[in-house]
Image (spheres, rainbow, N blue to C red):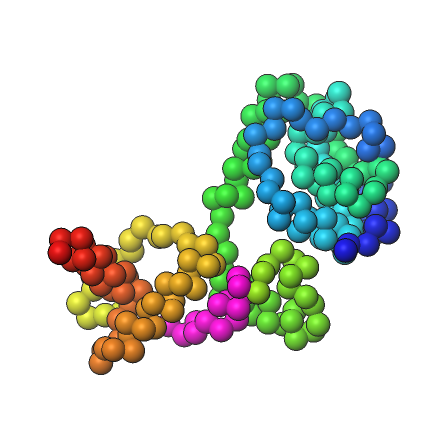
Amino acid sequence: MPSKRSSPSSAAAQEPRLCLRMSKLHQDPANVRAHPARALETLTAILARFGQQKPIVVSKKNVIIAGNLTYQAAAALGWKEIWVSRSALSDAEATAWAIADNRAPELSSWDFEGLSKQMQALMDSGVDLAALGWSEAEWTPLLNADWSPRPAHENEPAHEGVPIRLTLEERATFDATAAAIRAGLAETITDGAVLVRLCTAYKGSKTK
């Protein structure tokens, strides 16, 4: 259970903060960002451990433009006030910015090799990765992965294709399947060649 002792003032402030009473703020009824239970549990744990490291954004009417989940997590911790940044945007512009602010991170991706090294270093220093929002099923494939470059298959065109985004669970399933396929081959094949074999096998099973 996360500690309720943390508050906006628990983190060292770099500049004067505007903190408002939680009771004075209003969640955006038109917020289109869905927050599952795991997201709330994760952010609640993060706030409890690290304090509030960035403000939520509110309108002149104290409606939350960005940070509705942070507000919910703070409420779960029993906070009475929260650090805010007040926006001067009009209602329409605030809505547009909120959509853009939520969309931008979705267009980024992880450097999984670098992430695995950081996670290993954190684990070695005693940090619980579960407290950072990662499950054991998610971090185990990262820490056990072989990040050494694989030689390009001589029959595979050497050109850049369209990347496929996988969840960590999906990647773990693919890696396990790829390992089984490679174990039966004399030559080394790339992930792309593995995918071609899987698709070919699937198509073959459908025609029988």
Measuring from the top left, give residue 151's x and y in whole percent: 29, 73
Does residue 142 show up? yes
Residue 3: quadrant of the picture: bottom right
Identity of the residue drawn at 53% across and 63% down: 137
Of residue 39 and residue 101, the one placed in the foreground of this image is 39
Q: Is residue 23 above or below residue 55?
A: above
Measuring from the top left, give residue 77's x and y in whole percent: 80, 46
Identity of the residue drawn at 20% across and 61% down: 201
Q: What is the residue that sits farthest to the left in this orientation? A: 208
Identity of the residue drawn at 43% across and 74% down: 146
Count the marks.
Answer: 0
Residue 19: quadrant of the picture: top right
Q: Is residue 189 above or below residue 16?
A: below
Of residue 129 and residue 95, the one placed in the foreground of this image is 129
Q: What is the residue that sits farthest to the bottom in this orientation? A: 186
The quarter of the rendered structure image containing the N terminus is bottom right
Q: Is residue 45 left or right of residue 162?
A: right
Measuring from the top left, give residue 175's x and y in whole percent: 38, 67
Q: Give yes or no for residue 128 being in the magenta stretch.
A: no
Q: Is residue 66 left or right of residue 99?
A: right
Identity of the residue drawn at 71% across and 53% down: 46
Q: Is residue 148 left or right of residue 19?
A: left
Q: Magenta residues, as a range? A: 137-151
Q: Give yes or no for residue 138 being in the magenta stretch.
A: yes
Does residue 118 show up? no
Measuring from the top left, give residue 83's x and y in whole percent: 79, 38
The quarter of the rendered structure image containing the C terminus is bottom left
Of residue 158 and residue 130, the one placed in the foreground of this image is 130
